[in-house]
Amino acid sequence: MAQYLMAVHGNEEQYAEIDEATMQQMFTDVDAFNKRLMDEGIWVFGGGLEPADTATVVDATGDAPVTTDGPYLETKEHIGGFWVVEAPDLDAALKLAADASKACQGKVEVRPFQPEPPAA
Amino acid sequence: MSAAPAAIERVFREEYGRLIASLVRRFGDIDIAEEAAGEALLVALERWPADGVPPNPGGWLTTTAGNRAIDRIRREKLRDTKHQAALMIEDDTPHEPTGPVEDDRLRLIFTCCHPALAPEARVALTLRLLGGLTVSEIAEAFLVPETTMGQRITRAKKKIAAAKIPYRVPDHEDLAERVATVLTVLFLVFNEGYLSTGDGAPIRAELTGEAIRLARILHGLLPEPEVKGLLALLLLTEARREARVRGGQLVPLHEQDRGGWDRALIAEGHDLVRECLATNRPGRFQILAAINAVHTDAPTATATDWSQVVALYDQLLRIDPSPVVRLNRAVAVAELDGPEVALALVDALPLDGYHAWHATRADLLRRLGRSADARAAYDAAIDATQNSAERAYLSRKRGELVD
């Protein structure tokens, strides 16, 4: 089994305009999807994020840490939330991502985690 | 019996796809498979000239490469790297079921053409791993620098390994969509050979030949209607290849010497088209094959059943209503209803950057006696293509215009 990050990318301005009923449906669908991942034992971690304008960037690669307001990338599309799941291969992960995308009504990027280093 | 290196390399090229595919299945790693295959070739080049070619060269190469791969994994295990690969030697768990058809090469084709890989990487990987073409040959065929092609292939192989793109024939529910991707890749490879986009050789027979070889393998393993249709289309198109260029100039269909067409390929293609018709589940490639069957059936250009061709294009338009299909349909309409009707159809298409659109307009304008307009259209067509044979043909037609 491998672990995959499924990151939801979306346009926050558009998200803000979604009507109440659609939003409720989305919450219900995402809850159901989360429960399914847990029931199937492939859930590792997941959650929705506050909007990108609540983000802060810290850069300590120089002499002293520099803290700046705002997301790292100034784009329209931001990560709105993510899951970490267990899957045997990419095809299985892509199937989960298709269901995830439907549930949360956003585009989902799938990326493999690096494998754990072997036990010494 | 001794063997020349050239003959050994030919055997190797023929066996390459099967060899790599079986090594990938066994060791689960494309890099290990390629290196072991390369080492087996070196051993063959050393031994076969003295000992003769073994009775089953493919089996010999597989055994030799397998032993080399195991040696290599053992060495690396001692160095305590590549742990996962090292496990493969001891791991005797049976392979998971691999879908409806069991063949190493079929699995590898589906891996190379996985939709998670970039389209240009799918083509390159298929030619590299199944066709046995070198990176520099593939780079040359697609007119990109060798380093670019090398990076493209390396990146794709890395993604296959890191993202765990599976090495198997897709599940039944995904199969139709994935087969379509594979067929598109083979069609692209063929087309690049049949009318090269670059300024090198106008036709690259090694690419058309490779696409046909892979389509035959796919058809042997998965004889579905669209696979049959693609193979028929490639065979019927390839049958006309020799007659298509004369003196460095492209020869259009109606001017070709039909005696120069390959009758064996045509007969095989027609048989496949008949099988498709009997199945009656038409798809894009089957219809294109049927159109080519009508052309190759006619003893002369004028004897072509143009109403049948137009009817087939109408059927194709329902599946693929693209401007390029409309353009090709208009060419047939010109034969049926005259150039004026066809020109009205062609002028309405948004294909301003496409050489075939300009070339078709030029021909129709010429037939309507509108020389000045035709001349401008030939100029635009010549500007829009790099293919030397096509440019030579268009320049000749432009020169023949009378004021």
Image (spheres, rainbow, N blue to C red):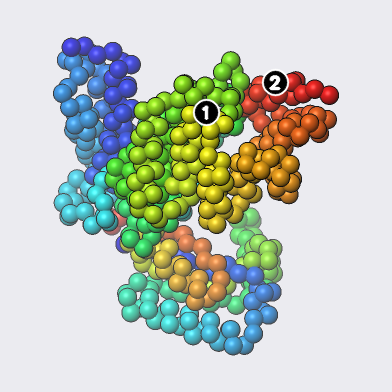
Residue at figure coordinates x 38%, y 60% from the top left = B174
Judge by depth and name the residue closer to the eye, B227 or A34.
B227
Classify the position of the C terminus of chain B by image quarter: top right
User: Which label is found at residue B300?
Assistant: 1
Find numbered disc 1 in the image and state the secondary structure of the residue it sits on: loop
Judge by depth and name the residue closer to the eye, B234 or B130.
B234
Quadrant position of residue B81: top left
Q: Label 2: chain?
A: B
Residue at figure coordinates x 39%, y 43% from the top left = B273
Could you say where residue B203 lies in the image, as x and y percent from the top left?
53, 25
User: Which label is found at residue B147?
Assistant: none
- The three-letter amino acid code for the residue at tag 1 is Thr
Residues marked 2 and 1 touching at CB (< 8 Å):
no
User: Which label is found at residue B396?
Assistant: 2
Could you say where residue A112 lies in the image, as x and y percent from the top left?
43, 58
Could you say where residue A106 lies in the image, as x and y percent from the top left?
56, 71
Q: Is residue B184 left or right of residue A78?
A: left
Could you say where residue B301 lies in the image, as x and y percent from the top left?
55, 30
Is the residue A94 above or below the residue B294 in the image?
below
Is the residue B25 above or below the residue A55 in the image?
above
